[in-house]
Image (spheres, grey):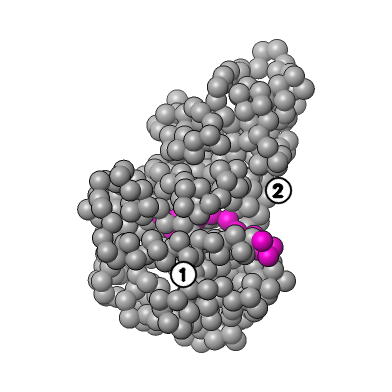
Amino acid sequence: MDLSLAIVAARLIDGASPAPLPSATVLIGKDGCIAAAGPADAVPVPQGVPTIQAAGKTLLPGLIDGHVHLAWNKTLYSANSSRDYTMRLRLGDPERQLLRAAHYAQMALAAGVTTVRDCGADDFTVLALRDAIASGDLVGPRILVCGRPITTTAGHIYSDWGVDSAEEIRKAVRILAAKGVDFIKLIVSGGTTTPGTNITQSQYTLEEVRAAVEDAHRLGLQVVGHAISTDSILLSAEAGLDTIEHCSWIGEDPKTTAPDKAAVELMVAKGVQVDHAIIPRPYLFPGESGVEPTAEEQWWLNMLKVRWPFLHYMRGQGVIVFLGTDAAFGPWPGTDCWPGAQEMARAIEVLVRWAEFTPLEALGMATREAARALRLEREIGTVEPGKRADLVLLAGDPLQDIRTLRRPEMVFRDGRLVARAGQIVLSGA
Ligand SMILES: [Zn+2]
């Protein structure tokens, strides 16, 4: 095979082996795929192949963010009325949104995120971005996109497209499929950022969610459901949704949270996967963000401390849990915290620091498990021969200090160096 590059690193976290491989070599083919990966003494570098000697450094698969909103801005987290909400999200015309989305997609890529799943925008701008990147017009991450989420009139993230019956859901799925989306996003429950929606209840009936799943699957599309209340999670599991976003297990009293055993059993039986979407809010990094937690944030932190163990419970029962960040972009309002580049690294840190996962488990949820959930496991998620050469090179060892992830030294997509020290490397440059 024609090789384009070899990387010799102090350690390789390949995502498939139970432990990192010390002193490993990865050979990359001119087709952008991994030709070989393994211990340096078993994988010699053929003469004449350009080689990066990465002594002391760690190579791992490109990160996969299962839940972003490239065209939205973090002000959405502080929306205070449904009508304002739509106005705030838009922040300009579609052309400006598209340019901003392109900028943030590149920031994510430079931070080691080589694949993102865009879980909703106001319209279809991100489809154009996906296609521009795929055709090589722009350097960026691989993007899966749903366009507009399907929601009810006055429902969570409603703008002006209310979809209110099984028949309207089928029509909506077909409209989205005709637009060329990669998956369907269904807003099954209310949401905390849209005041007036009910976060303890489902917006749709079982029959309606089933209509979405049947029609989308017939068209070869996954259905990704926003579901935070326990009843909406149960209904999503019964209907056989592909992934449940957030899965917060909010009870009838919104101050209570606990997983439902029957729902978890259904999720396992039907292969429903969970993206908890760890939003790396500044208060989760005390002493760093320059802002002290407010009383409300302290309440949330205590709530999350109860909720995070549910991830261990679900995994223990056999549910695939993967990672997303719900990243909208720009800094957190009132701070300069991570305006697009560190969300994924920080979400992984939260899993390690607060949720008691090992660094290797957290990295697995951000790579291998996410690839499985996105049905891309044949292409990405691990460093193995035949997979796309999406790689991140870190200066140190993330298993010793997970914060090493915040600033990758190099990022490769499809075998090509696309970012170095946080800067995008332009195609042909
Ligand atoms: Zn979201």
The residue at 34%/66% (across/down) is 299
Q: Which residue is mark 2?
A: 378
Asked if one can make out residue 89 in the rendered structure from this viewpoint, the answer is no
Q: Is mark 2 within 8 Å of ligand 1?
A: no
Q: Position of residue 372 (x, y in %)?
A: 66, 54
The residue at 50%/51% (across/down) is 351
Judge by depth and name the residue closer to the eye, 197 or 297. Answer: 297
Q: Position of residue 358 (x, y in %)?
A: 57, 46
**How many residues crowd around disc 2 within 10 Å: few (fewer than 14), some, or many (20 or more)?**
few
Above or below, 361 against 306 in this view is above
Q: Which span is picked out in magenta?
A: 316-327
Q: Which residue is mark 1?
A: 149
Q: Amino acid at mark 2?
A: Arg
Q: Which mark is residue 193?
A: none
Q: Is residue 301 magenta?
A: no
User: Secondary structure beneath disc 2?
Assistant: loop
